[in-house]
Image (tube, rainbow, N blue to C red):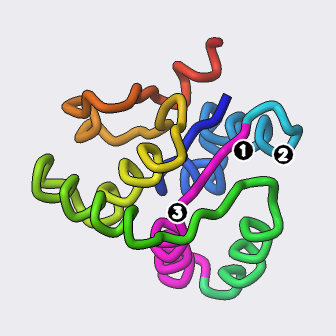
Amino acid sequence: MKVVLDTNVILNGIKGIKADAKILEEIDRGNILACFSTVNLAEVYFVLLKLLRNKADLIYNTITDSKIDLIEPDLKIAKSAAVNKDKYDFSLGDSFVLATALQTDANYIITNDKDFKKVKEVRVVKPSEHSEK
C-alpha cells in the first residue's frame, strides 16, 4: 500500500505527537510505503530552520536518508498542482501533496489538514485513522 504524507505529519512526528510518530516508525520498519514531495520537504526544512536551527540539517538528512520515497515534481505534477490549487484553493504545498498522490497512484494521503476533506480524487485519512488499521 502506497501513501503520500503531508508536511504536518512529518513535523508532528518530529515533535513526538503519538499518531504521527507512529506513522514515521512504521515507515522506518518498512510497513508503510510512503511518498513525499520535495516541495513539501522544503516546507519541512523551512520550519526546522525557524524552530530548530541547530538541528535542522541533521533532521533534514535523516528524512532524506530514510525509507520515504522523495518525489521530485515533473511537468505533470507541476501542472496538476496548479489545477489543485485553483480547484481547492489550497496552499501551494497542499497542492503538491495532492498532485503527488494522483501521479504516484497512492492509495491515500495521510494528513491532519482539514482542508483535504473536500478532496474526492483520492482517499484522505488522519494519522490516527491509519494507526487504527
Q: Tell me which numbered mark, 2 or 3, is placed earlier along the sequence.
A: 2
The CA distance from mark 2 to mark 1 is 6 Å
Task: Name which residue type carries label 3.
Answer: Ser
The residue range painted magenta reads 33-52
Q: Tell me which numbered mark, 3 or 1, is placed earlier along the sequence.
A: 1
Name the foreground residue: 104 vs 58: 104
Is residue 63 found left or right of 41 in the rendered image? Answer: right
User: Alpha-carbon neighbours of circle 1 within 10 Å: few (<14), some, or many (≥20)?
Assistant: many
Look at mark 3 in the image and give the residue it sits on: 37
Residue 82: horizontal and vertical position, in percent? 22, 64
Look at the numbered disc 3 and give the secondary structure of its residue: strand
Q: Find residue 83 and name its label.
A: none
Identity of the residue drawn at 61% across and 31% down: 19
Identity of the residue drawn at 46% across and 50% down: 103
Look at mark 1 in the image and give the residue it sits on: 24
Is residue 31 found left or right of 72 in the rendered image? Answer: right
Task: Name which residue type carries label 2.
Answer: Asp
Residue extending farthest to the front is 76
User: Alpha-carbon neighbours of circle 3 within 10 Å: few (<14), some, or many (≥20)?
Assistant: many
Look at mark 2 in the image and give the residue it sits on: 28
User: Dominant secondary structure of the magenta stretch?
Assistant: helix
Cβ–Cβ below 8 Å for labels 2 and 1? yes
Q: How many numbered discs? A: 3
Image quadrant containing the N terminus: top right
The CA distance from mark 2 to mark 3 is 18 Å
